[in-house]
Image: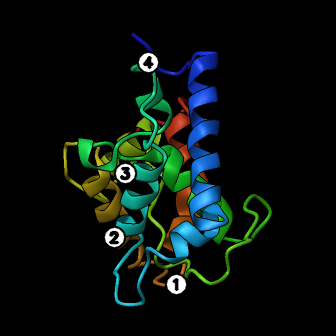
């Protein structure tokens, strides 16, 4: 069983799938832009298509699903959401290459630290750490900043990592 580590074959499969996306869409950006609508509340529809395209050539190992999760399989899709955060937001951490997508459309990348601290702070009560949790948390954070709710990612994560406080 794999949790954090992937085999070299997983990376080969990822690159095969990225190559197929590049041939079909021209770029990862075009795949995402072609999958998101101004009417969408968030980017989850595009995230779903992105994940499906990266599974066109199924991974040879189950660990590939940890690297690139299937959106429909109840994953919070942290890596995919983190990638979109890097590409859409622009600050000291994020690249901001894809300015055509609004920061209000991306979804909070949720890991165990974000999950735990968000529940402890009373931001969200949902018990399942899945994409619904991530979108509900993002919607809750829009109460603080409707235009850029994901900017709280780094702060929440590090509060969750910090073991010196009992929240």
Residue found at x 66% / y 64%: 27
Binning the other alpha carbons within 10 Å of mark 2 as few (below 14), some (14 to 19) or many (20 upward) gives: some
- Does residue 75 appear left or right of residue 162 in this picture? left
Choose the circle earlier in sequence order: 2 or 4.
Answer: 4
Choose the circle earlier in sequence order: 3 or 4.
Answer: 4
Label 3: element kind? helix
Examine the image and state in which quarter residue 70 appears.
top left
Callouts 2 and 4 close, C-beta under 8 Å: no
Label 1: element kind? loop
Q: Is residue 6 visible?
A: yes
Could you tell me residue 108's position as x and y percent? 46, 59
Using the image as rendered, state which of residue 93 and residue 113 is in the foreground.
Answer: 93
Q: Which residue appears farthest toward the right when viewing the image?
A: 92
Residue occupied by mark 2: 140
Residue found at x 42% / y 32%: 58
- Quadrant of the image containing the C terminus: top left
Res. 147 mark: 1
Callouts 2 and 3 close, C-beta under 8 Å: no
Could you tell me residue 95's position as x and y percent? 76, 64
In this view, the mark in front (2 or 4): 4
Residue occupied by mark 3: 118
Res. 61 mark: 4
Q: CA distance from mark 1 to mark 4?
A: 39 Å
Choose the circle earlier in sequence order: 3 or 1.
Answer: 3
Q: CA distance from mark 2 to mark 3?
A: 10 Å
Could you tell me residue 30's position as x and y percent? 60, 72
Q: CA distance from mark 3 to mark 1?
A: 20 Å
């Amino acid at each position: 069983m794999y949790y954090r580590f992937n085999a070299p074959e997983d990376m080969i499969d990822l690159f095969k799938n990225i190559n197929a996306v590049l041939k079909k869409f021209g770029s990862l950006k075009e795949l995402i832009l072609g999958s998101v609508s101004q009417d969408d509340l968030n980017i989850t529809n595009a995230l779903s298509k992105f994940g499906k395209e990266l599974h066109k050539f199924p991974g040879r190992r189950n660990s590939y699903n940890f690297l690139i999760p299937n959106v429909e399989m109840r994953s919070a899709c942290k890596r995919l959401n983190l990638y979109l955060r890097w590409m859409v937001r622009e600050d000291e951490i994020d690249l901001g290459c894809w300015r055509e997508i609004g920061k209000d459309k991306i979804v909070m990348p949720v890991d165990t630290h974000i999950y735990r601290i968000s529940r402890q702070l009373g931001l969200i009560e949902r018990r399942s750490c899945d994409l619904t949790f991530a979108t509900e948390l993002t919607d809750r954070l829009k109460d603080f900043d409707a235009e850029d709710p994901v900017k709280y990612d780094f702060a929440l994560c590090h509060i969750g990592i910090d073991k010196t406080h009992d929240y």
